[in-house]
Amino acid sequence: GVLIDPDNLRQLKSIAKIVYLKVDSSILYERMMQQETLPKFIREACIEEDFQQYINSRMKLYELSADIILDISGKTISQCVGLLNQYR
């Protein structure tokens, strides 16, 4: 929710770099389905449709807001840390 409000985004950017850890939506879907309960924005009868709609709207927002975008699809935690350390 922080990135939706322009004032929040402006304040956040004034104190920090925003890093978007981009991952393939199929991985996010798998992770969501492994949880005991679905997020509140997902309706039981429309899981895939609601998920895709949410992801499409959020990914655009994240990409526009980010100072740094790192695609971490298929990477280990160590590889992700290595990528992040390049921007220290």
Image (spheres, rainbow, N blue to C red):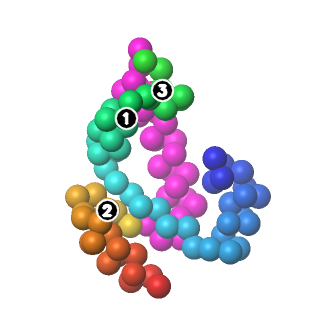
- Compared to residue 85, the image places residue 20 above or below, namely above
Looking at the image, which is closer to me, 87 or 61?
87
Alpha-carbon span between mark 1 and mark 2: 21 Å
Magenta stretch, main secondary structure, is helix
Badge 1 amino acid: Gln
Where disc 2 sits, the SS reads loop
> Badge 1: few (under 14), some or many (20 or more) residues near its Cα, within 10 Å?
few
Look at mark 1 in the image and give the residue it sits on: 35
Where disc 3 sits, the SS reads loop
Q: What stretch of residues is rendered in magenta?
A: 45-69
The image position of residue 45, as x and y in percent, is: 41, 14
Alpha-carbon span between mark 2 and mark 3: 25 Å
Look at mark 2 in the image and give the residue it sits on: 72
Look at mark 3 in the image and give the residue it sits on: 42
Alpha-carbon span between mark 1 and mark 3: 13 Å
Answer yes or no: is residue 29 visible: no
Answer yes or no: is residue 72 visible: yes
The image position of residue 51, as x and y in percent, is: 42, 32
Q: Nearer the viewer, mark 1 or mark 2?
A: 1
Where disc 1 sits, the SS reads loop
The image position of residue 65, as x and y in percent, is: 58, 61
> Badge 3: few (under 14), some or many (20 or more) residues near its Cα, within 10 Å?
some
Give the mark nearer the N terminus: 1 vs 3: 1
Give me the residue at 41% from left, 34% from top. 52
